[in-house]
Amino acid sequence: MGRLGPLTSMALGRSPYDDVVMGEGESDPREPLQMYDERGRPVNPETKRINKDIIRSHNEVMLVIGVVESENTIEELKAEQLRRYEHEHRDVHIARRLEGVARACEFFGVYGVTGMRQRILLYREYQHVPFSRLWQVERQTQSPTSLWLHGLPAYLASTYIEMPWISNRFRASAVARAGFTYLKISLELWGLLQQTQLLPSSASPWFPSWKFFVPFSSASVISPCPLPPSLGTRSILGWLSRIGLSVTPYIVSWLLHNLYVSAWFWLHKEIYAMLPSPSNHEPRSIDNLTLSHRLTAERESEPAQSQQVPPQDATERPIHAMPTEDRPRRSRATNNEDFSSDDEATDEVVSATLISFDVENHPENPDPAHDSNIPPGVWSAELRPNPGHDSAGSRDGDDGGGARRRASSRIYRVNELTRLPAVYAAEILARQLTSLIIWPLEAAALRELAWQWCQARGMSTRGLWEPAWAWPLRASNGLFGFRFDFFAGFSSGSFVNLIGLELVHLLFDATMWSLVSSYVAGSIVSDEQW
């Protein structure tokens, strides 16, 4: 039925929501496939392309004949685009440099606190050390080199092999992924043993020997398990249980790492959503909504105006008394939104400024009291550039309401540089909260590793805390065999030292955040300044 198909259907009493009844017979192979948009309206990409070409040619013709004036030439648009690109590139470059410095400071801050934190969680002697003397005791028990560098090479190696450009090469093979995970956990466990001073003095200060990576060897965390004395069920089950107990440090370390990463990502997302950060609403939907209201108002006002003014009144009405607002503006640049949907780009359409025509009758002997004295054929015209965007608020129909809305809605620069303070703050808070959430599990896993390591090598475990997997419950003779104890596996002194150390770490992170935020605030340049 062509373009008037919907109107014909409505005239015949059919609803556009009725089921489509397919006709019988052979279909025309030359008939193009009808496509629809998300609103169920028929669309045709070829028609849209033709309409855009018509709009472009229409505006170019109006530019050539002088009816409209181009606001920006192609060279100006390219220069503006290049200026914005250089501005954005400069902000991204500064943000990534700052992010690298912040990551380095964060890494050394975390690593400097991690060793002391693990020793507080493992050794009983730290419960008697006041927090004010904690640093002095650490300096007396070990040298500054061992205090800051023990376990650092292994930790850096485990972090490096986890980088995407290395780990992504082996994601296709499950065996390669398992091998990389085993290597990473082995390096992390070596760093833990070195930081907690459980390695022998003959151990290398850099990296473990190859025997450390071989399971069931004398130097491995997975201690050797002798074969069962017999092939009985009890002997085999006991041997398998000892193997499972030996592998426990690796399993617990892997689970704890995944739990930490999951908790950190969730907290980071929630905290970042609550922090103030630069963001802009989508301006396209607002502009389209304003344009649709304007077009609807114009369509409704056109028949009303034609009904209010009779034909004879329109011919007898003096031209100089015709108001400017009611004058039809036929010479205008065609809007791309008249023929396209909301998701089409409008940057290809030539932007133009219209020229207004003020036509008035100027007789030689004007007589305002008698219109009959006006001789015919005497006119004067004045060409004036259309204010365009400056008068956009007056065309909204609300006495400048559109201008007030645009002035009240701020537009922020949103890029890596402006978002860096909020992102960095969210990372710091997420890491601190995650560390406080999982510290009971971290303490239990660390103590389990230390106990198995010491027992397999005949070392004393008298100064070590026992693993408290059921924290905050303690075994007792109660109804269920447990009772609640917040300091189960801990003491008030070790708890105070742990909280104080976390506060010092938070203070260090806050200082770094303030320096980064100050530098970001001084590095942001507006479009006008650029």
Image (cartoon, helix red, strand yellow):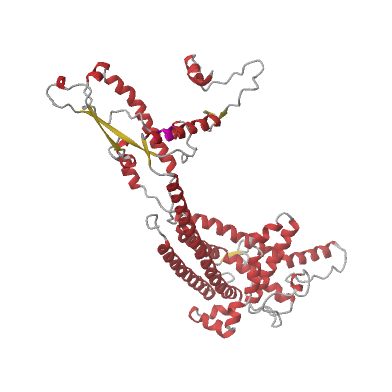
Q: Give the left or right position of residue 231, taking residue 527 as reference.
A: right
Query: What kind of secondary structure does the magenta stretch mostly adopt?
Result: helix
Q: Residue at x 58, y 69 (%)?
A: 488
Q: Could you tell me if residue 39 is visible in this image? A: no
Determine whether, in the image, residue 373 is placed left or right of residue 506. Answer: left
Residue 45, relative to residue 169: is it above or below? above
Comparing 410 with 313, the one in front is 313
Residue at the (52%, 83%) spot, across then down:
136
Residue 451 position within the rendered picture, expressed as x and y whole percent measured from the top left: 68, 73
Residue at the far right in the pictured view: 230
The percent coordinates of residue 105 (x first, y second) are 52, 70
- Residue 182 occupies which quadrant of the picture? bottom right
Where's the N terminus, which quadrant?
A: top right
Boundaries of the magenta span: 58-62
In which quadrant is the C terminus drawn?
A: bottom left
Q: Position of residue 339 (x, y in %)?
A: 46, 31
Q: Position of residue 357 (x, y in %)?
A: 29, 32
